[in-house]
Amino acid sequence: MAGRIARSTCCAASPIVNWKAVARAYNPTQEPTRGRLRELCEKYRLSAGFTVFRRGEHGLEGRSTYYSLLSVLAGRSRQEGQDEEGSELEQAAIGMVEQFSVPLAEFLSQHSLKQLPQADCFYDLTAATAQRLAEHGRPLRSLVAAARVDEIADDVAHLEGTSPRGGPVAVDLPSALLERQGVVAGDLVWVFSRVVGDAALVEVLQAIQAPVRVDVNWPAGAWPVVLGSDGLTDEERAEDAAHFSAAVGANLTAEELAGLRADAAAGRIARRRLHPAGCAGS
């Protein structure tokens, strides 16, 4: 039933990105190179990310370095003159890498970033990323749209998607902007726009399609941008509801309640001590 928790599909910026996305975020006007990335790491004490050795049919096929999305948003904050916010997000990114690098390295050694929603740690990773954004007061201020590349015709790419407020939006971008990042028709992106002096700077960040879980408390303004419904029919939703009511959602019978009270009185039910965040356990 794990797959039936989802109730809609969102266009989410991948919580894990490649190193080029980080280099671009800190200086979108320069070509991303590993040398520039090393300079950024030294200047801003960035996370070192985590390196994945990709395996294929014939053994090792190369390596890739990945970072938390928070590193990208830290770079955007720096570009917008929000150095304190950028520093906080950089430190949060280090914590995210420390927490998830092991399971992610194992998954990404045999899968692509677009397959990330299939990883066992995906929901925890995404929710933790959104929570960090909320804690550091980082709304996605410059986000214009979460969109799918509908068509690339000549020099213009046509995108259809959703604004952060939920309304439909169409965006036309230079196709070269997408080609530089390997974005093709059918791919998902987040489109950002901000004013730099008397000009507007438009940037794109590759995104992924992911199911939204109703049991995750998404912080307002951080996550996610919903693209559409879950694709289930009314009959399938009714079946889900019936299954829930017959299983974990079912009421206890009178006999079950009596047995539960007897076990509690006899001390046969193990107690679990909860430690709220910030409270030390005994």
Image (cartoon, rainbow, N blue to C red):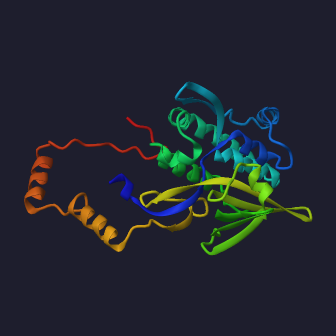
Above or below, 268 against 190 in this view is above
Above or below, 125 against 97 in this view is below
Residue 177 picture location, percent across and down: 78, 55
Above or below, 149 against 95 in this view is below
Q: Is residue 220 left or right of residue 239?
A: right
Residue, x 52% and y 29% (percent of image)? 57
Q: Nearer the viewer, residue 270 or 114?
A: 114
Above or below, 41 against 122 in this view is above
Residue, x 75% and y 52% (percent of image)? 179
Q: Nearer the viewer, residue 186 or 128?
A: 186
Return the residue found at the far top. 59
Q: Nearer the viewer, residue 172 or 267?
A: 172
Residue 158 picture location, percent across and down: 71, 67
Q: Quadrant of the C terminus?
A: top left
Return the residue found at the far right. 198
Name the image quarter holding residue 243: bottom left
Q: Quadrant of the N terminus?
A: bottom left
Q: Nearer the viewer, residue 251 or 120?
A: 120
Residue 101 picture location, percent across and down: 56, 34
Return the residue found at the far front. 154
Name the image quarter holding residue 137: bottom right
Residue, x 40% and y 37% (percent of image)? 281
Residue, x 82% and y 33% (percent of image)? 39
Q: Tag count in the figure?
A: 0
